[in-house]
Amino acid sequence: MDVGKVKKCSLPRLSLSENNLSVLHSEKQFYWRSPKKQISWSFVCGLLLFALGLVSLFTGHVASDLEWYSQRLINRRYSKLDGIDSAAISIWKSRSSNFYYGCSNRGHHFPRAVRERVSNGYLLIATSGGLNQQRTGITDAVVVARILNATLVVPELDHHSFWKDDSDFISIFDVDWFISSLAKDVTIVKRIPDKVMRSMEKPPYTMRVPRKSPPEYYLDQVLPTLLRRRAVQLTKFDYRLANSLDYELQKLRCRVNYHALRFTKPIRELGQKVVIRMWKMAKRFIAVHLRFESDMLAFSGCYYGGGDKERNELSQIRKQWPTLPTLSPEEERKRGKCPLTPHEVGLMLRALGFGNDTYLYVASGEIYGGEETLQPLRDLFPNFYTKEMLAGEELKPFLPFSSRLAAIDYIVCDESDVFVTNNNGNMAKILAGRRRYMGHKRTIRPNAKKLSALFMARERMDWDTFARKVRSCQKGFMGEPEELRPGRGEFHEFPSSCICRKPYGKNIVDNSSDLEPPGEDDVLGSDREDELDNNSDNRGNQHLLDRFSKEIVDEARDIEELLPD
C-alpha cells in the first residue's frame, strides 16, 4: 500500500483534511501521542545525592550484618550438601570450619605508609600488663600510628607489672620481621635518630589516652601535640583504641597480631619442640589454659573454700589494684565471673565427651594450691603434661622470664587441636581470635554462669543427667563459626572483618601462618629430621609433616606480601 492510499484511508476516520493537517502540523498543535514531561537535572542530581546518602548510612554495620546473615543461610546449604546434622557437635573439630579462612590482605586502595622524613612525627608507646595484654597494646599502637601518619618507634614493654619481667621487645618478638612485614602499612624504627633527638627543644611529650578512644580522639587531641613537639609517648597503652574501626584498619590489626608479631627464634624452636613431643604421643591433644594463679583469683574477688588463709593471702594481692571495688564472692560466682577450679574444668571436659585417654597439655603459671589443687584434674586425665615436663633442661634459660614462658604456652595452645580457656582474660581472647582466623579451630570457653549453678547441684543428679546438662550449657561456647557475629565482643576475640567464606567447592590456601620457612637448623632442620627419622613408628609423624608443609606454603604467601607493588 502506497503513502497516498494510507492518507486516503486514515484521514476521513480522523475527520481531517490534508489542508487542516498541514496547518496543524506546522503550528505544532497536533501530536500523534502525548508528549512526556521533561525532568529537570536538579531533581535528578538531588535524587542521586539522596541515594548516595542512604548507601553511606547503611554501608558499615548493616552491610556487614547482612553479609553475616547471608552466610548463615549459606551455611545451611553447605550443611545439607555435606550431610551435616547441625544439632550434633563434633568435640574435636567444627564440621563447617573448612569453609572459612583468614583474610587480612591490604586493600588495593589502602595507601602506602608515609616515609619517616615526611611523617607527622614519632610515636612512642609504653605497653602495660603481661605478655598478651601487651600484645593488644602493640597491635593497636601500629593502627594509631597509621591514623596519625606517624613513624612508630618499637614499643617499650612493661617491666613493672605483677610478673616483674624485664624482657624487652627484641627479647620476645622478632623485631626485624615486625618492621619489614609492616613496611607497607606503617614506618617503624627501632629508636628516634640521634640527630632528631638533638634537634628537639624538649623531650617527647608524655600523655595517657582514655580507654577505647576512637580515631577522632587521636586526631583531635594527640595529633596537634605530635605536630608541635615532633614526638609523643603514650603510656599504659592497653585497650586504648576503640573496638569498632574502619574495615581496612581492622584488617591492619589482624596483619599485626597474626603475622607481624612473631616470637624470636629460640622461643619458636622450643615451643615447636614441645608441640612435636605432644604429637608424637597422640595424634591430637587438648591444651587447657587453667589461669588459676593467685593474681587471677585475687582480681576476680572469688572464694574457693580455703578459709582465712585464702582470704588473707588473696586480699593482700588484691591491694595492688586500689581502685577495685569490694565484691561478693557468691554474687560473682552467680554472674559467671569466677574461674572454674581445675577439677571443674576436668568434669566439664569429661561431660562433653573427652575420654580419660585424652592427652592434656596444661598451660599455666604457679597454680594456687599447688599439686593438691591439680590432682583431681590429673585423676580425670592421667595423660597430663606441662612445658616443664616436656622441655626439662631446655626450659632453664627461660625460667627467669615469665613472658617468655607464656610465649611457649601460647605456641602450644595455638597448635593444639582443642583449646580450652578458663576465663575471659587476655590470653584467652587473643588465642580465641587467632584460632578463629586460622580456620575456626575448636576453642571451648566455659559458660561459667550456667556451669557454676550446675556444679553446685552436681551431687543431686546422676552422671548422665549432669553430662547432658553440661552439653546443653556449652552450646554457643564451642568456637563454632556461627558464634562469630559483626560487632560482638572484643575485636581481638572476634575478628569478623578478617574471616572470609570460601566459595563453595573452592580450596583456598589461607593467609594465616607466621612461621618462617624451615632452614638448616630450624623447625625441620637436621636435628629434628633425625628425631623424626629415629621415631618413624610413632603416631602423628604424617600429621606433623602435613602441618609443616602447610606452614611453608602459608609463609611463602606472607613473604610475597612484602614484595614491592
Image: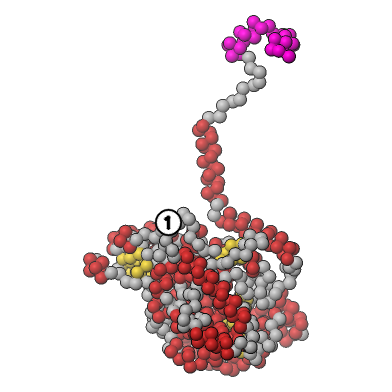
Taking the spot 62% from the left edge, 83% from the top edge, the residue there is 540
Residue 84: x, y in percent?
A: 73, 68
User: In this image, 150 relative to 238: left or right?
Assistant: left
| Element on which disc 1 rests | loop
Taking the spot 73% from the left edge, 77% from the top edge, the residue there is 469
User: In this image, 94 relative to 400: left or right?
Assistant: right
Q: Quadrant of the C terminus?
A: bottom left
Residue 6 lies, with reference to residue 368, above or below; the image says above
Quadrant position of residue 78: bottom right
Residue 306 lies, with reference to residue 521, above or below; the image says below
Residue 489 visible? The answer is no
In the depicted view, which residue is nearer to us: 245 or 543?
A: 543
Q: Main secondary structure of the magenta part?
A: helix
Residue 304: x, y in percent?
A: 59, 87
Residue on which the image places disc 1: 111
User: In this image, 501 relative to 133: left or right?
Assistant: right
Quadrant position of residue 186: bottom left
> What span is in magenta?
1-29
What's the amino acid at mark 1?
Answer: Pro
Residue 163: x, y in percent?
A: 44, 84
Q: Quadrant of the N terminus?
A: top right
